Amino acid sequence: MKKLTIAFFVCFFGCAQAQAEAVTVPPLKPAAPVDLQAAQPSPPVPAVASTQASTTPAPAPASTVAVATPAAPAAAPISAPALRRAKPAKAEASPDAVDGYKYPPARAAAEKSTQWANLNNAMVSGGENGRVSVIFGQSVPKIGCAYLRVCSVELEAGETVNKVDAGDPVRWSITPSIVGEGTGKTVYVVIKPKSDEPGLFTNVKIATNRRMYDIDIFSVTGERFVRQIAFTYPENDQRQWEAQRAAMAKEEAVVTAQLPALSVDKLNFNYSVDGDYPHRPVRVFDDTAKTYVQMGADFRTQEAPVLVLIDADGKEQLVNYRLKNGYYMVDKIFSKAALIVGVGGSQQKVLITRAQACAKRSLFGSCVAE
């Protein structure tokens, strides 16, 4: 019995000493908290230290305690920005794909065309019969037409329509109307909406034998709408000035190419011109066979005088002549002639006298005093 009691106490004190030594093991440091939202969850670490501390009576080696410490995790935590960069980016809308335009040059061209169409350079001006006028080519006219009303586009007189194209031919009626005839014929393009729906918008292209018209039309409500629109054409003013300059140059030019071939050494310019007729000849000469009387540049706009010969007795005689390109061409050499305009007291007369033949002439046919 005593042996059993002694063995019990020996075992009791030995186990107590072992437990005391186990308790003296330095406590494990708690692991650093892990941000579960910023990093992926790491696999759980088995609690080796706690199991050994509770089941093993012997003290755990230092290496075993170090392994159980989760101070050095197996994988470094991944930050949130790195995760976002790793994910495939969503396809964002390209700034070039605006209003269906994929390519920048195409969109830029559309923007410039729209800016020109909406320019305010061609402001309207009023006219007769409720007509408003705009300058052709400065911008795109905007015409507001009302349901059950008629709008009309007046083209230039003499202009012929080849084709009319409308963006919405279903809800818009576009028909021709002709006023006048011949060279004064004027075409009107009649436009009206078929629906009473306001805000219908489209454009019309009118191709003629002279130009292409581009017009925007839209439907409105009420009584305020465009009844008639016309155009002014700056190029017509330019053409009129060019025609005027060409006519002046033609009148001022001395026409000699259509005259017979003349020899300079045979020309005689020794003629005198006297009289009160304002449109006097500018030059008179002969080639020893015919006499030429050249009139001024304004001769074509004036009444043509009658050319007669004056004999030695001062009587007037008819003579054959031709009037061509401002020249009186007489088929003979005369000593004296007259250009007569009017009759009676309102008669105007210019006398043309041929001087006596001179013995010596200059290079241009004029007499040179000896």
Image: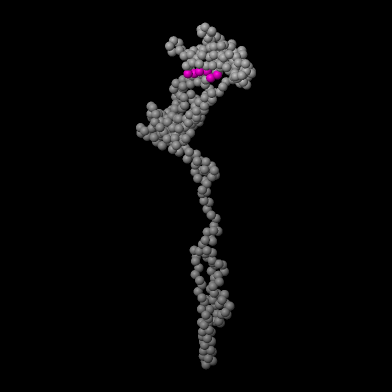
Q: Position of residue 344 (x, y in %)?
A: 44, 10
Q: Decide if residue 221 is on the left or right side of residue 240.
A: left
Figure disc tally? 0
Residue located farthest toward the bottom when viewing the structure as drawn: 2
Residue 169 is situated, as x and y percent measured from the top left of the image, at 47, 31
Scheme of image coloration: one colour
Q: Residue at x 51, y 89 (%)?
A: 9
Left or right of 229 on screen, residue 312: right
Relative horizontal placement of residue 72, taking residue 184 as reference (left or right): right
Q: Is residue 32 above or below residue 294?
A: below
| Residue at the (54%, 57%) spot, across then down | 87
Q: Residue furthest left?
A: 223
Q: Nearer the viewer, residue 275 or 193?
A: 275
Is 321 drawn above or below residue 81 in the view shown? above
Is residue 282 found inside the magenta-colored segment of the image? Answer: yes
Of 328 and 102, nearer the camera is 328
Q: Is residue 151 shown left or right of residue 241?
A: left
Q: Which residues are magenta?
A: 278-283
Check if residue 277 falls in the magenta segment.
no
In the figure, residue 57 lies in which quadrant? bottom right
Image location (x, y in percent) of residue 15? 53, 85
Let me know if residue 264 appears in the view: yes
The prevailing secondary structure element of the residues shown in magenta is loop
Q: Please identify the quadrant where the C terminus is shown.
A: top right
Q: Residue at x 51, y 72 (%)?
A: 31
